[in-house]
Image: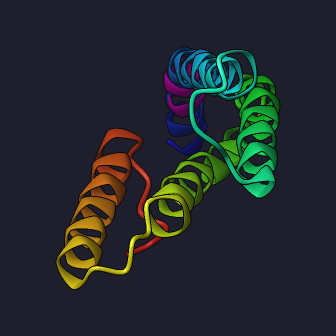
Amino acid sequence: MKTTYDREKIKFYSKVMPVITVTLGLLFIACEVMIHAFQFGTFNFVTEIVNGVALLLSIILTILTRKFSSATWFVCPLLTIFVFYYLTFVDYDGVNTSIFYTLVIGITITFFLLVVLSEQWII
């Protein structure tokens, strides 16, 4: 029973992770081009590092999830941390209504990730 579950989990993540990785890669490239080539806005250097690390970890998880079902445990936490970094540090403006709205969006996205990726590490 456990081996069947692990095999199905590996099959699911081997289809999902390349899509997530390509999407993160395209977003990383788009941000770098907009910031450095077109001088369209500014990014904190830490944000560029976070983008690169998230892309690198996503590539590593794409490779690992094809062989090991235990590697899938790290997909949802990676995406959740990445989303919360953007919502709390990059999009912070100090207005109470905006902070509440950002928290609602963050919680909604977290639960969406939990449902889509069948992970329950946060509950």
Above/below status of 50 relative to 63: below
Residue 20 occupies which quadrant of the picture? top right
Residue 98 occupies which quadrant of the picture? bottom left
Above/below status of 87 relative to 62: below
- Pick whichever, 61 or 91, lies toward us: 91
Residue appearing at x 50%, y 42% in the figure: 1
Above/below status of 102 relative to 71: below
- Residue 50 at x, y percent in the picture: 74, 50
23 sits left or right of 122 in the view? right
76 sits left or right of 54 in the view? left
- Residue 110 at x, y percent in the picture: 36, 58
Magenta run includes residue 12: yes
- Residue 19 at x, y percent in the picture: 53, 16
Quarter of the image for the C terminus: give it.
bottom left
Tell me how many marks there are. Answer: 0
54 sits left or right of 9 in the view? right
- Which segment did they paint magenta? 9-13
Furthest residue in direction bottom, as rendered: 96
Image color mode: rainbow
Magenta run includes residue 103: no
Residue appearing at x 41%, y 63% in the figure: 120
- Residue 74 at x, y percent in the picture: 66, 52
- Pick whichever, 1 or 18, lies toward us: 18
Q: Main secondary structure of the magenta part?
A: helix
Furthest residue in direction front, as rendered: 39
- Pick whichever, 85 or 45, lies toward us: 45
